[in-house]
Amino acid sequence: MFEVSQINLSDGFVAGRMLGLVGLLLIMLASAYFIYMARKGKVPKIRRIAGIDAIDEAIGRAVEMGRPVMCSHGIAGLTEATTGPQTIAGLGVTAYVAKKCVDVSTRLMIPVRQPNVWPIAADIVETAYRMAGKPQEYKSSDIMFLSTDQFGFTSSYIGILMREKPGANIMVGAYWAESMQLATSGARAGCIQIAGTAAVAQIPYFVLASDYCLIGEEIYAASAYVSGEGEQIASLAGQDFGRLIAVGIMLLGALLNTAGIKMIIDLWRW
Amino acid sequence: MSSLLKRIEIPIFLTIVCCLLQVVPYYFYWKPLDDFATREAQWMNLIVATATFIGLISLVQVHGANVQKRSKGWYFSVVTLVCAVSFAIIGLPLPEYGLGSLSYWYLFLYNNGQVALSQAQFSLLAFFMTSGVYRAFRARNLESGLVLGAGILTVCYNAPAIVATYPFFADIRGLLNDIPNLALNRAVTIGAALGAIILAVRTLLGIERGYLRGGGD
């Protein structure tokens, strides 16, 4: 049998990570290709995502009710490998919400758990006000650092929801055990809620207690989706290419393994 | 000079360099590069630690204004500020004065204050989940009916008296958990991982700018 693990690699490459590297490069090349095509004017069509489309509706409702908008980018920082990207995705949504809120002159409140994310969130909101020509309306006290303690943050967030009664509560990012408490409290406060996370264990809670839910990868697509920029939207087609690779490897692996051929398993050791 | 420093290309360039410094050593080992990536991670920790002061400034800004204006519930803001300042002072790394994060008073306040309050908030989750389950377990359509069915089977599995009487509940729950639940779990996980990769590609190419001033120049 062909043993891929026996292939001699140069000393510099780390064993067991080569298949991942090949997959990563293929996905990156596919994305780069679709971005290149988008620059030439061929932007792929992507499906509508109800949760993202509902952001405008939620802000509009808050304006009609004369209530503020609450937007959270999750409770994680930027440095962790699995949760950092969720925070970045959440900040992308925050940027869109900030622009919309500035346009309609609605107060936007952003609760922050990680001090290192605070300057980024503040910069996003301040820039939105500056670009709209309303720098004097920006209030840094609306970007609120609550607590680094998970449940200190949660109780403070719930307190703000119950006191301020925002018209919309938008939560996109990494969440843990507090997801159910935040979403249920938002529902009690009468907010229209849009929640999304890639933390698999928390998705059911958001589905249960929110009006719209972004599931897993949808939060990463959100910032590209709301940007409306062809290049960003085109990059999502690269994600579909990666999905095809994943499905292909899974099917091939299942068939070969059933036939007693361990080639795919050996490839992972490459 | 100041307008040059405000250009968005600078943080994009720094992001790309820092990303590559973490990604390349994962696949390709070269000691000088690996050492530099480790050093970069240490710098990152230092920057994150420095940002703690920003949190404190924001806290004082928000709660100080509440106290100053005598806003609704301003006395809670006083408690918050007193606690924050007390912890900051008691936690100063001066063991010769009985201060520091291992001092008696710091541990006393931490264990009897913060830990107790945090656990109290966490324990409330049970009630939130119960009310959530009440809303979820309503068979309004086929999908919610399936959720109700799966939920009842799982509840039965978690009741020792029922499993002792009817052991097949354990098998059904195992079937539900190991096949449809695990398959969906992996599907969402793989999708999320691909989404994160594409976000990284956009960041590396400098077209994802949501985290940089909301994409504004």
Image (cartoon, coloured by chain):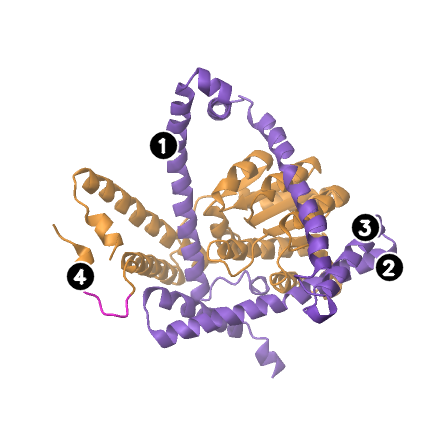
Answer few, some or many: residues within 10 Å of disc 1's Cα (few below 14, many 20 plus, some between 14 and 19): few
Please tell me in which quadrant of the rendered image residue A189 appears. top right
Check the residue under mark 1 and report the chain it is in. Answer: B
x then y, percent, for residue B147: 49, 26
What residue is disc 1 on? Answer: B179
Chain letter tied to purple:
B
Which secondary structure class fits the magenta region best? loop
Chain letter tied to orange:
A
From what the image shows, is residue A265 above or below residue B102? Answer: above
Residue bounds of the magenta highlight:
A8-13
What residue is disc 4 on? Answer: A7
Give me the C-alpha separation between circle 1 and circle 4.
35 Å
Asked whether the viewer can see residue A62, the reply is yes
Check the residue under mark 3 and report the chain it is in. Answer: B
Q: Residue furthest top?
A: B165
As helix, strand or loop, the secondary structure at mark 1 comes to: helix
Q: Are marks 1 and 4 on the same chain?
A: no
